[in-house]
Amino acid sequence: MTPKVLVLTGYGINCDMETQHAFKLAGAEAKRVHINDLINGKERLEDYHILAFPGGFSFGDDIASGKVLANMIKYNIGEQIQEFIDTGKLIIGICNGFQAMVKMGLLPGFNGDYATQEVTLTFNDSGRFEDRWVHLKANERSKCVFMKGIDRIYLPVRHGEGKFIAKNPQVFAELRKGNHIVLQYTDTQGNSAGYPHNPNGSIDNIAAICDETGRIFGMMPHPEAFQHRTNHPRWTREELPEEGAGIAIFRNAVEYVKDNL
């Protein structure tokens, strides 16, 4: 079986083609689908195994990054999303997709609640758009299926609202206890560090989280932007594998579907 991926597009989403290509390189059949085609029933979410919310600037980041897209999805196809999750399928949100996921309540998904917003992503502490490469370390206790076998990874970020915060301190206690924290920003040696290593000021250096099943995953860095060694900022000065490190995240999702669905 070839896993089928629905890559959402429309209204300012602009990393859909790269995300589609990354999934294809990972062995999936990936299709870009406009959000309106899901809402009007032209496309059926149930026909796919993986749903991807790509990065970009949906609705021009009006109100707050991802907020309009989050409401559009939640109040039109929220039940379809819930059924998708209930059948054991996978969801990934990258950058603006992550922002939309937290604002519709899909993450962190405490106790199976995918409708209540507990966290958000807000303006960077630097007060400006950050476009740089960052070092990330993975939580070895996380259940996240997308990060299987990955301890550290180097990826680009490009966002103006990437600071991860919660409405109260108890949320962070739950995130830690349940191993919802998947990736954290580090310095070049893998140690916790501030700006510019943490490009946005995220609490606890959080760069990515998942739900308690490990199947619903959101991250600010862009793995689809590191598909080939020539994407790396030092590709002319370092010996690098032909395949970019970001593809491993997509391949993990594809292999999970093959083994479990």
Image (tube, rainbow, N blue to C red):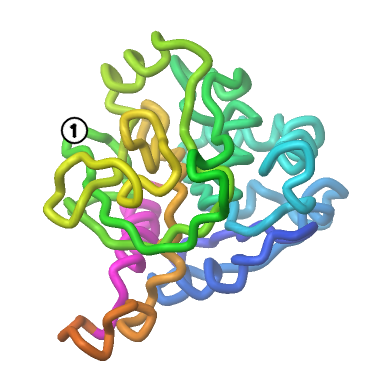
Q: Is residue 132 left or right of residue 197?
A: right
Instruction: Report x, y in % for residue 218.
Output: 47, 43
Q: Quadrant of residue 63?
A: top right
Q: Is residue 63 above or below residue 155?
A: above
Q: Position of residue 258 (x, y in %)?
A: 36, 57
State left or right for residue 138 relative to residue 132.
Answer: left
User: Mark 1 Cα within 10 Å, few/some/many (few <14, many 20+)?
Assistant: few
Q: Nearer the viewer, residue 211 or 182?
A: 182
Q: Is residue 176 magenta?
A: no
| Residue found at the far right of this picture | 40
Going 48% across and 62% down the picture, which residue do you hit? 131
Q: Which residues are magenta?
A: 242-260
Q: Amino acid at mark 1?
A: Arg
Residue 77 makes an appearance in the image = no
- Residue 84, can we see it? yes
Question: Which residue does the image show at 27% across and 85% down from the upper left?
Answer: 235
Residue 22 lies, in percent from the top left, at 45, 71
Could you say whether the residue bearing mark 1 is in a helix, strand or loop?
Answer: loop
Q: Nearer the viewer, residue 189 or 211?
A: 189
The answer to which of 51 and 14 lies nearer the viewer is 14
Residue 217: image quadrant is top left
Q: Which residue is identified by label 1? A: 141
Q: Is residue 93 above or below residue 252?
A: above
Left or right, 106 with respect to 133, comes to right
Given the current orientation, which residue lies at the most extreme bottom position?
236
Q: Is residue 254 magenta?
A: yes
Residue 78, x across and y down, in percent: 71, 32
- Give the residue drawn at x 47%, y 11%: 168
| 22 vs 62, nearest the viewer | 62
Residue at screen point 26% across, 17% down: 177
